[in-house]
Image (cartoon, rainbow, N blue to C red):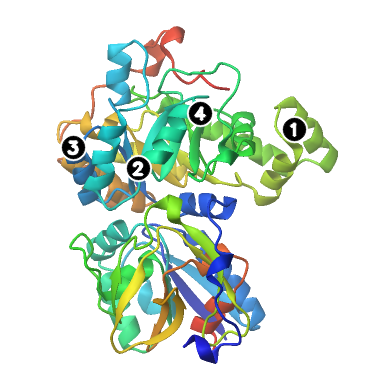
Amino acid sequence: MTETSGAETDLEQLRRGTDLLKRGFAQMQKGGVIMDVVNPEQARIAEEAGAVAVMSLEAVPADIRKRGGVARMADPAEVEEIVEAVSIPVMGKARIGHTKEAQILEAVGVDMIDESEVLTPADDAYHIDKRDFTAPFVCGARNLGEALRRIHEGAAMIRTKGEAGTGDVNQAVYHQRTIKGAIRELEGMTHEEREAYAREISAPAELVHETAEMGRLPVVNFAAGGIATPADAALMMHHECDGIFVGSGIFGAENPEAMADAIVQAVNNWDDPEALAEISKNIGKGMKGDANVDLPEEEKLQGRGV
Amino acid sequence: MSVTAGVVAVQGDVAEHAAAIARAAARYEESVEVLEVREAGLVPECDVLAVPGGESTTISRLLHDEGIAAEVRDHVAAGKPVLATCAGLIVLSSDARDDRVSPLGLVDVAVERNAFGRQAESFEAPLAVSGLEEPFPAVFIRAPVIDEVGDAEVLAEWDGRAVAVRDGPVVATAFHPELTPDARLHGLAFFE
């Protein structure tokens, strides 16, 4: 018991909302699949399939794309229903730069906030100052400069932007390769070359040095944007992502239960082709999707929030 | 002789445990090889085993699906050391009070998942741990508590509730020793 120990626990020394706790929460998601859900029933299906968390939103990105108009944070009452429906963490999306939506999501009790380009940006110049929050944030990035700027603002997790709602994994691959390629380049640079590189990509020099020394982003790095099949998820793990967000790919599929279950298993077995073959059999059709090459530039979401 | 340490790697903070094991081994001047366990067949090669933090529903499901669960039981039955943290504690408990988790019954305690609340209630604090001279920097993330202790020794309490126990070869904590540079708990579980 504690009496036999040389010290006593002092309850007053408790601290909340530290970087260690925010980044630690993200680290607990590693090797997992985070699924987009729009209602409690979908959230329960995701939990049952082995999702590590759910992303609660009003409509999946593919539907947001089709519908057009302004995409905003979901109704807090609906987010609350999802929070109450499952035992796994619940995340919510706020518009880029929309500090108030983020505060509302934090007040509702979401475990992580996604400052997301899938919603219509509220601020063209600034992202949310995420250091002010107790809740951890995840942000999208297409390249190392975007990733390190978001981390500097307080993001505890980075995900590729990909091209959300397309079901085309092409852009997620491109963004992950771009980030990893830049880190490999950094590793071969001298101190002053890294300083110059930091200026070139408009990133804080200390984060550039930290990334170079670690040989990876200093926070958890997930894949997102266009992942639609178990093979897509495995491909992103092959590209050294720490885990996977699946948006429209689950509930836009013919058989969401089978797809959700298969993607969870594929992430654990990403380097075993025979297991992947078994996992990919008879799970129904994936979401139809739109090939990224056919998408007009003005319909792309990934350019939002640099 | 080199120690083979397995880290159950179906989901969770695996690299952090691998790094903590390496730090603990260096402290005890042991050489160690770390294996990531994502499939059956590897646990029997391991001298010691870490079950990481993560999502207990996911880890529980994949441990059973992949056939690793039975191997972990055999490992403990053989008296080989295990360190289980947070979700690991839940998965190894005898009662998770939640039918979304199928616990292995290797630590004789009942746990309550997310007992402190959601992420906003996650906290860090120095914690007195039996067997350690100085308090341990404990990191609780959506952590469980142990609300009933059977045939197990309580190693630490937070506000009157058990948060670390030893049951035979298994040390289990509600917090995450792998998230701090302090390797004493990995040392206590594996090398003492």
Inspect this view and state whether residue A29 appears.
no
Residue A250 versus residue A204: which sits nearer the camera?
A204
Q: Of the residues under marks 1 and 4, which one precedes in the sequence? A: 4
Q: Residue furthest right?
A: A192
Side (left or right) of A213 relative to A81: right
Asked if marks 2 and 3 fall on the same chain, the answer is yes
* Residue A198, label in figure: 1
Give residue B153's quadrant in the image. bottom left
Residue of label 2: A34
Which element is circle 4 on? helix
Q: Of the residues under marks 1 and 3, which one precedes in the sequence? A: 1
Q: Is residue B42 above or below residue A135?
A: below
Q: Position of residue B168 (x, y in %)?
A: 37, 89
Inspect this view and state whether residue A147 appears.
yes
Q: Of the residues under marks 4 and 2, which one precedes in the sequence? A: 2
Q: Of the residues under marks 2 and 3, which one precedes in the sequence? A: 2
Chain that bears disc 2: A
Residue type, numbered disc 1: Ala
Q: Nearer the viewer, mark 4 or mark 3?
A: 4
Q: Position of residue B189 (x, y in %)?
A: 49, 82
* Residue A99, label in figure: 4
Residue type, numbered disc 4: Thr
Asked if marks 4 and 2 fall on the same chain, the answer is yes
